[in-house]
Amino acid sequence: MLRVTFLGTSAGAPTTHRNVSGIAVGTTLGPDWFLVDAGEGTQHQVLGSALSLHRLRMVFITHAHGDHCLGLPGLLASAGMAGRTAPLAVWAPRTIATWLDQTLAATTTHLPYELDVRHADEVTTWPWDDHVTFHARPLRHRVPSHALEVDASVTTRRLDVNVLDGLGVPRGPLWGRLQSGEPVVHEGATIAPDQVSAVHTQRRRAIVGGDNGDPAILEPYVEGLDLLVHEATYTATVAAQVGDWPMHSSAAQVATFAERCAIPNLVLTHFSARYETLDDLAAEASEHYHGTLALARDGDTYTLDPTGTLQPGNHIVLRQPARRG
């Protein structure tokens, strides 16, 4: 039902195999997608994926730090150069909107499509369509920061085969019309869809976060949450050495919070460039959390299916390590 692709999983600065923050969120209903953060190089990461800038519908910038937003002007310009004409929504702190206007003006960048800009520090809920509603959830960081909550639902009508057979309705076009919610006439009698079917709604919720030094700030929003995507910049040992000033979370902090709140699926991202491997972060998180846990790599795709189970998808190599020597 929900699909999450990681375009960048590094914190602060890119590494040879990880770009800075960028997360694509979509649904299994179609190819449209939404971008959470656009660190420098995000447009290049998109080129290496199956995502199309023509199907991008909204960019959500969590906060005004470079590793989360410096790629936005280039991505917008590239979309225009690729022939995009459909409007694009940008949901971001007001400071980002001001900076974006100034950057586009200073570089004489003229977009061949309209931007629908809304300010996340003022507009906190965005009912997108009949299937998806977005919420901006406050986080704790050095500057105002938000997580994007995605509330997705799919409604389906299930036919009761026994009732239909009992009424003598033959399989075929009449069943299809009833399935779509249309009444039909059979042997002179009108059959309403509700007579022979039931409507089922499946709902799944995910929170995809920006930088956050206090996972517990999300507690008012996590009851019934299916998936939390959260930063884990450091191990607890390194976090203690760095101190509270950067306001980032350790793997232990996030894992402990997710375990206490019984969040069934947890994906960690935004790892400090000091970590060449994620082994220490994975071990620390596993010690405190016993649900479905993943540490994202650039190119990883995860799907939250209608049952709430997190399914790993294909891994795509988006960046090749730099050659040495």
Image (spheres, helix red, strand yellow):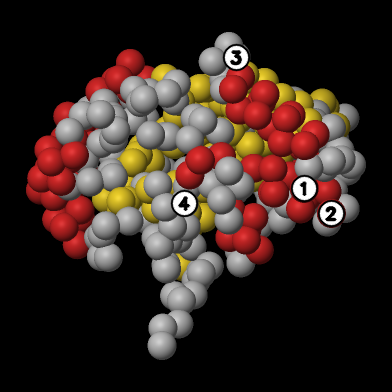
Front residue of 60/276: it is 276
Would you identify the image quadrant in which residue 308 lies?
top left
The type of residue carrying mark 4 is Val
Q: Would you say 246 lies left or right of 280 here?
A: right
Q: Earlier in the sequence, mark 3 or mark 2?
A: 2
Q: CA distance from mark 3 to mark 2?
A: 30 Å
For the C terminus, the quadrant is bottom left
The residue carrying pointer 4 sits among few (fewer than 14), some (14 to 19) or many (20 or more) residues within 10 Å by Cα, namely many
Percent across and percent down for residue 256 are 16, 35
What secondary structure is found at the residue carrying circle 4? Answer: loop
| 176 relative position to 263: left or right | right
Residue at position x 35%, y 26% in the image: 141
Gap between marks 1 and 2 measured at Cα? 6 Å
Q: At x 17% / y 33%, what residue is drawn? A: 243
Q: Residues within 10 Å of mark 3 (few under 14, many from 20)?
A: few
Question: Residue 49: image x %, image y %?
Answer: 61, 63
Instruction: Reply above or below: 52 against 240.
Output: below
User: Where is residue 48 shown, x and y percent of the image?
Assistant: 61, 67
The residue indicated by pointer 3 is: 123
Q: Amino acid at mark 2?
A: Met
- Find residue 65 and name its label: none
Q: Is residue 285 above or below residue 119?
A: below
**Quick one: SS at disc 1?**
helix
Residue assigned mark 4: 20
